Image (cartoon, rainbow, N blue to C red):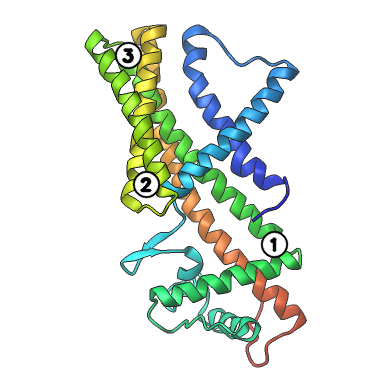
Amino acid sequence: MIEKFNFYDVYGYFMPGAAVILLFWLPFGLVKNSWPATDLGSAVIGIVGAYVAGHLLQMICTKVLPSTIRSGGRQRNPSDVVVDDTDTNFASEFKAALAALVKKEFGLDLRIKATPTTEIDRVRGDAFNLSRHALQHKKEVSYAEQFQGMYTLTRGLTAGFGAGCVYYIGWALSVFHHDWVDCFVIVIITVSLLAADNFTAILWKGGGKTLESWTASMLLLAALAAGYLLGRHFQPTPIKAGIFGLCAMGALLASFRCFMAYKSFSFSFAKTVWRDFYSSIDKEQPPANDAVSSR
């Protein structure tokens, strides 16, 4: 946990929150040429709003977009995967030396050569958290925190662009309006928000992956319906509706790109913590017979 306001708050909360606010404001700028005010008071309100929006966004996408990957038929943390014997992110010699150092420092066996199991990953997770704590204690974790900030940023942007995509689709579809559709959309928004609220309450009590997916689906459906109703109110021209369609495709592509970057940064974070831990301890107490040549 990062205990004071620093670049992580900017990367993890402010920037994703600001991006979401701008994404959802864009239609008003295109239709009504109404853009955010630039005076100091509005800027302060915007900064606070973006920071709060970023927190809300991370509360959602932390559940829906975990940093785990599927390996060996189950979801696993990158920090566990990179020390598998068959993984190629680290050299075999380094993994053996790292395991020896972890055993010496914490009394935990990474079991590099063993077939990964849930229990082995639990031990590796404890070792990883202890290693990171050791780096924080030595104040040598800043580089790893940069990767943590980047993967939190890209995770938030993945969710933000995804929500923006369906929001723009709603604006684009608003040119094909009928009264019965309006009523149907209002019902969708009401049901979606109520369902999402209930699902979220269950999730925080230990709900499963299915409920997480339902929560995301309900919120996306609410964004779609909100875009449609706002479009009905402001009545964009068919040309503007086409622009919103292009914006939706752009947001979808950006969401996919950010998701790929998010997965990459989550691995970079895990690898950096393991490397920095080995380097920091090795400089003071080099394990006998387990040194790894530096590159």
* Secondary structure found at label 1: loop
Q: CA distance from mark 2 to mark 1?
A: 31 Å
Residue 165 against residue 141 in the figure, above or below: above
Q: CA distance from mark 1 to mark 3?
A: 49 Å
Give whichever of 84, 187 is nearer the camera: 187
Question: Which residue is identified by label 2?
Answer: 212
Residue at left 50%, top 7%? 32
Residue 272 against residue 220 in the figure, above or below: below
| Image x and y of residue 14, in percent | 63, 36
Label disc, if present, on residue 141 of the rendered structure? 1
Within-10-Å neighbours for mark 2: few <14, some 14–19, many 20+: many
Q: Earlier in the sequence, mark 2 or mark 3?
A: 3
Residue at left 61%, top 16%? 36
- Quadrant where the N terminus sits is bottom right
Residue at left 51%, top 80%? 110
Give whichever of 54, 237 is nearer the camera: 54
- Does the CB distance between marks 1 and 3 fall below 8 Å? no
| Image x and y of residue 281, in percent | 71, 77
| Image x and y of residue 81, in percent | 45, 69
